């Protein structure tokens, strides 16, 4: 089970992928459980509930660049672009939305969030391997990196439902808003 870790200021910090790492933070006195799963792990002399959400006891520096959702996955791009085609403004879904490289990869464009937008299949096919200018198309918004709120939104939409439900219940119970509603 994964564990959401909040900074001492209750800002999203990271996800601990393995329960043993989350329990280690608790045993070392670095974090306090805010919420736990019903699952229990047992040692020879004790049993422990697996933490769902931890809060660090001291503020952790976040100056280092966060890598969470820095790659332009389809889900990340669709969330950032509000599930709208960036050429014709058509409403998109996970099934109908595609990623389009503004500067095509065949023309030296890179596969990064600042070069990828959400597009409907029609616009993506029409643009093909051209730049928007060459195809006579206009971008509604310039591509950009995801905000921290969008990263968290992506994360919560990709985790297992048991984890998501536990995290959301804890955040709601404690009045913690990690992103604007």
Image (tube, rainbow, N blue to C red):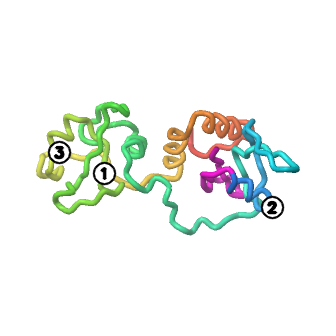
Residue 4 belongs to the span the image colors magenta: yes
Q: Quick check: 44 left or right of 86?
A: right
The residue sitting at the right extreme is 45
Q: Quick check: 68 left or right of 125?
A: right
Image coords of residue 178 (percent x, y): 61, 46
- Write down the residue under mark 2: 29
Image coords of residue 25 (percent x, y): 74, 59
The residue sitting at the front extreme is 44
Image coords of residue 93 (percent x, y): 36, 31
Residue at 52% from the left image edge and 53% from the top image edge: 148
Residue at 67% from the left image edge and 37% from the top image edge: 166
Q: Give the range drawn in magenta.
A: 1-19
Q: Residue 137 got which mark?
A: 3
Residue at 86% from the left image edge and 48% from the top image edge: 46
Q: How crowded is mark 3: few (under 14 residues within 10 Å), some or many (20 or more)?
A: some
Query: Mark 3 or 2, which is nearer the eye?
Result: 2
Residue at 26% from the left image edge and 46% from the top image edge: 100
- Provide the secondary structure element on which disc 2 rests: loop
- Provide the secondary structure element on which disc 3 rests: loop
- Provide the secondary structure element on which disc 1 rests: strand
Q: Quadrant of the N terminus?
A: top right
Residue 126 belongs to the span the image colors magenta: no
Distance in Å between CA atoms under marks 1 and 3: 15 Å
Q: Residues within 10 Å of mark 1 (few under 14, many from 20)?
A: many
- Write down the residue under mark 1: 116
Q: In which quarter of the image is the C terminus?
A: top right
Q: Quick check: 74 left or right of 29?
A: left
């Amino acid at each position: 089970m994964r564990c959401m870790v909040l900074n001492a200021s209750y800002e999203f910090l990271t996800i601990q992928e393995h329960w043993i790492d989350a329990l280690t933070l608790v045993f070392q006195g670095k974090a306090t459980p805010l919420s736990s799963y019903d699952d229990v792990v047992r040692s020879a002399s004790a049993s422990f509930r697996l933490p769902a959400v931890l809060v660090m006891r001291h503020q952790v520096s976040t100056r280092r660049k966060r890598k969470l959702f820095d790659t332009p996955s389809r889900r990340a791009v669709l969330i950032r672009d509000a599930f709208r085609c960036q050429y014709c403004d058509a409403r998109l879904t996970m099934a109908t939305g595609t990623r389009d490289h503004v500067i095509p990869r065949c023309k030296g464009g890179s596969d990064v969030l600042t070069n990828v937008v959400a597009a409907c299949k029609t616009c993506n096919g029409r643009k093909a391997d051209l730049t928007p200018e060459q195809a006579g198309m206009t971008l509604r918004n310039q591509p950009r990196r995801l905000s921290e709120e969008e990263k968290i939104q992506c994360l919560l939409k990709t985790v297992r439902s048991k984890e998501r439900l536990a995290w959301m219940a804890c955040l709601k119970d404690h009045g913690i808003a990690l992103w604007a509603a």
